Image (cartoon, rainbow, N blue to C red):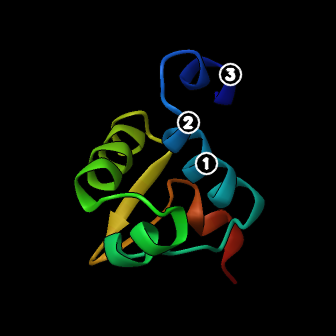
Amino acid sequence: MAEIFFTCTTELHQRIWREFHTMPGQRLTVGQACRLFGAPSSDVDAALQDLIDLSILRRIGPYYVRADWERFTA
């Protein structure tokens, strides 16, 4: 899955994916993601939406989490 989307995305997409990949329980708001990745909200919003469209992430309320988040909860 990761190899497919890495071939057609930006460094920001990859950085976001790596953060969620290495920390499966991670959940971030757009504001938190902007601070963490040092990018403007328009860029972060677009990248997060792209990752949702690829079924890598999903949104729960104001939070973005891995699409397979339930696998990591008790």
Please state the total of marks drawn on the protein image.
Answer: 3
Mark 3 vs 2, N-terminal side: 3
Question: Which of pointers 3 and 2 indicates the residue nearer the eye?
Answer: 2
**Circles 2 and 1 in contact, beta carbons < 8 Å:** yes
Left or right: 64 in relation to 27: left
Residue found at the very far right of the displayed protein: 22
For mark 3, does the 10 Å Cα neighbourhood hold few (<14), some (14 to 19), or many (20 or more) residues?
few
The percent coordinates of residue 12 (x first, y second) are 50, 43
Residue receiving disc 1: 15
For mark 2, does the 10 Å Cα neighbourhood hold few (<14), some (14 to 19), or many (20 or more) residues?
few
Locate the C terminus by quadrant. Answer: bottom right
Separation of marks 3 and 1 at Cα, in angstroms: 14 Å
Residue receiving disc 2: 11
Q: Secondary structure at mark 2?
A: helix
Question: Which of pointers 3 and 1 indicates the residue nearer the eye?
Answer: 1
Mark 3 vs 1, N-terminal side: 3
Q: Residue at x 55, y 52 (%)?
A: 16
Q: Residue at x 58, y 55 (%)?
A: 68
The percent coordinates of residue 62 (x first, y second) are 28, 77
Q: Residue at x 49, y 30 (%)?
A: 10
Separation of marks 3 and 2 at Cα, in angstroms: 13 Å
Separation of marks 2 and 1 at Cα, in angstroms: 6 Å
Q: Nearer the viewer, residue 19 or 64?
A: 19
Amino acid beneath label 1: Arg
Amino acid beneath label 2: Glu
Left or right: 65 in relation to 29: right
Residue receiving disc 3: 3
The percent coordinates of residue 66 (x first, y second) are 54, 58
Q: Residue at x 52, y 62 (%)?
A: 37
Relative to residue 68, is residue 25 depicted above or below? below
| Corner quadrant of residue 22 | bottom right
Relative to residue 24, is residue 73 depicted above or below? below
